[in-house]
Image (tube, rainbow, N blue to C red):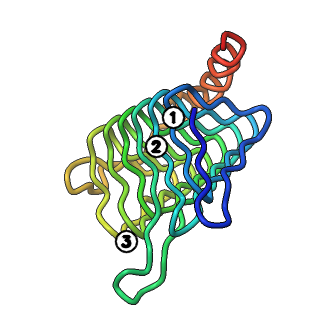
């Protein structure tokens, strides 16, 4: 793991978090308790803040960035809540993912988007700027559109997945 300051900001990592080798953390990045950032991720908090809550995971090869005020509008931080799953090779940019959100493998979440609590963006989907995935909704496609409500079993599986990554991160941390 490589941590780079940017301006007055230095990444802040909770002692219980796991940040894998090959990861790059730049600037205003905050990682919460028992969260995990997996191999070869890049989190660049240069023009705004990236905040990751407790027990969330950003899986291998994902990129998390923010949005600056380049067009005269406001800048956008990236806020990731507690118990969030972000699949391998996802692109997360200037958005909010609330608690228990799920972002599938290779999915893209663009500026100003919100994934509300328990919402899910399917693998490979692209959520275009300013869209909101409601609580318990499943969106899919490029561009992503509402597909259906998640079942109770799917919601339970997603929650179990987040706790599974906490356990797996502890194993990786102990091995390093």
Q: Residues within 10 Å of mark 2 (few under 14, many from 20)?
A: many
State the residue lying farthest toward the right. Answer: 15
* 70 shown above or below 47: below
Above/below status of 117 relative to 156: below
Q: Secondary structure at mark 3?
A: loop
Residue 117 horizontal side relative to residue 113, left or right: right
The residue beneath circle 2 is 42
- Mark in front: 2 vs 3: 2
Q: Residue at x 57, y 27 (%)?
A: 20
Going from N to C along the chain, the mark reached first, 2 or 3, is: 2
Q: Which residue is mark 1?
A: 23
Which part of the image, by quadrant, shows the N terminus? top right
Q: Give the residue at the far top of this rendering.
A: 175
Report x, y in % for residue 156.
58, 31
The CA span between labels 2 and 3 is 23 Å
Q: Residues within 10 Å of mark 3 (few under 14, many from 20)?
A: few
Q: Position of residue 78 (x, y in %)?
A: 53, 60
Q: Position of residue 131 (x, y in %)?
A: 36, 67
- Work out whether mark 1 precedes mark 3 in sequence or the reverse, and give the earlier one: 1
Question: In this figure, which residue is indicated by the disc labeled 3?
Answer: 130
Q: CA distance from mark 1 to mark 3?
A: 28 Å
Distance CA(mark 2)–CA(mark 1): 6 Å
């Amino acid at each position: 793991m490589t941590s780079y300051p940017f301006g007055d900001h230095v990444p802040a990592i909770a002692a219980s978090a796991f940040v894998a080798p090959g990861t790059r953390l730049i600037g205003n990045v905050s990682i919460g308790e028992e969260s995990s950032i997996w191999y070869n991720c890049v989190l660049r908090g240069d023009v705004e803040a990236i905040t990751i809550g407790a027990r969330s995971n950003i899986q291998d090869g994902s990129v998390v960035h923010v949005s600056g005020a380049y067009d005269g509008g406001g800048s956008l931080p990236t806020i990731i809540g507690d118990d969030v799953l972000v699949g391998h090779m996802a692109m997360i940019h200037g958005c909010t993912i609330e608690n228990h959100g799920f972002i599938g493998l290779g999915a893209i979440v663009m500026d100003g988007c919100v994934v509300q609590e328990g919402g899910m963006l399917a693998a490979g989907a692209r959520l275009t700027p300013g869209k909101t995935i409601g609580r318990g909704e499943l969106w899919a496609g490029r561009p992503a559109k509402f597909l259906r409500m998640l079942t109770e079993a799917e919601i339970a599986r997603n929650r179990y997945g987040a706790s599974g990554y906490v356990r797996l991160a502890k194993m990786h941390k102990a091995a390093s």
